[in-house]
Image: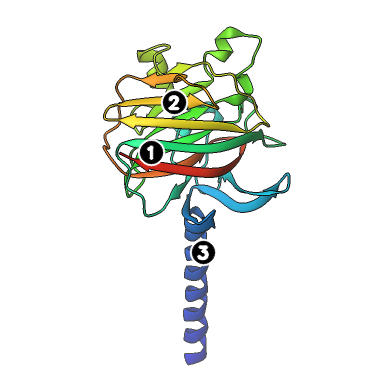
Amino acid sequence: MKRKINTYLLNIYLFSFVLSLCAVCAFGQEIVFQKQKFEAINVTASVVKLNGEEVLKVERDLKALPFDVNRLEATVDEPTYVKLKNVDFENGVIEVKMLSQIQNPSPFEGAQGFIGLAFRISDDNTAYESIYLRPKVGRSENQMFRNHTVQYYAYPDYKFDRLRKEAPGMYETTAPVNINEWITMRIEVNGQKAYMYINDARYSTFVVDIMKGSTTHGSIALWVDIGTIGYFKDVKVIKR
């Protein structure tokens, strides 16, 4: 009888241990890259070599955070990122070099290489601001598609679909980018305003007149979404 109880307790322990490992994969995996520490949130992440140099590879983890193609607007623009640890950012400059590819096969036929930055992230990941790109349409022959290359949103209340309906064209714009190429994104944050610069542009490509998020400070993260393989390097943060 005692042996059966011990076996039962051992099985419970092993089951709990496996669950805890799964939780670490979705939340809490720590990655050190270029002397910076990141925490994986609803993504898989690793340091890999791309064209001979070390980069941080990030993909949305659909087991940790599934999406429904029939409820796309409700299951995208989510906290799917690697979060920079030990950073509390309010105003200043964030810069990163990033490259996106489309997964093959892709879980979403409308994937456009969604990649960008999140900032002013709350400790529990329940609120933040974000600006991201859809590089696949950045040089489209269709101007309407091009107009959706850049996207701002504020999680959780102001995702792309709500902003597009309530303020068409206000939180999106064009940018001459593409998949499979390195893009430098720089975001300057000052109070309720955010300015985004692409590559070596002297003037901002995009301005958010009044950000709609509920946070005023918090962490910074490298963000991807459905069907994207994101590569990042050279993250720089200047606080003001």
Mark whose residue sits in front, 1 or 2: 2
Label 1 vs label 2: CA separation? Answer: 13 Å
Percent position (x, y) of residue 108? 62, 31
Percent position (x, y) of residue 9? 47, 80
Q: Tell me which residue sits at (66%, 9%) in the image.
A: 141
Disc ID at residue 21: 3
Q: Tell me which residue sits at (27%, 27%) in the image.
A: 192
Residue in front for this viewpoint, 227 or 37:
37
Question: Farthest residue toward the front?
Answer: 202
Q: Tell me which residue sits at (47%, 19%) in the image.
A: 205
Does 78 appear above or below 27? above
Instruction: Estimate how packed mark 1 is, as few (under 14), some (14 to 19) or many (20 or more) residues with alpha carbons within 10 Å.
Output: many
Percent position (x, y) of residue 28? 45, 58
Tell me the SS state at disc 1. Answer: strand
Which kind of residue does numbered mark 3 sit on?
A: Leu
Query: Quarter holding the C terminus?
Result: top left
Label 3 vs label 2: CA separation? Answer: 38 Å
Residue in front for this viewpoint, 115 or 63:
115
Percent position (x, y) of residue 83? 44, 48
Q: State the residue position of label 2.
A: 196
- The first of marks 1 and 3 along the sequence is 3
Mark whose residue sits in front, 3 or 2: 2
Label 1 vs label 3: CA separation? Answer: 27 Å
- The first of marks 1 and 2 along the sequence is 1
- The first of marks 3 and 2 along the sequence is 3
Which kind of residue does numbered mark 1 sit on?
A: Phe
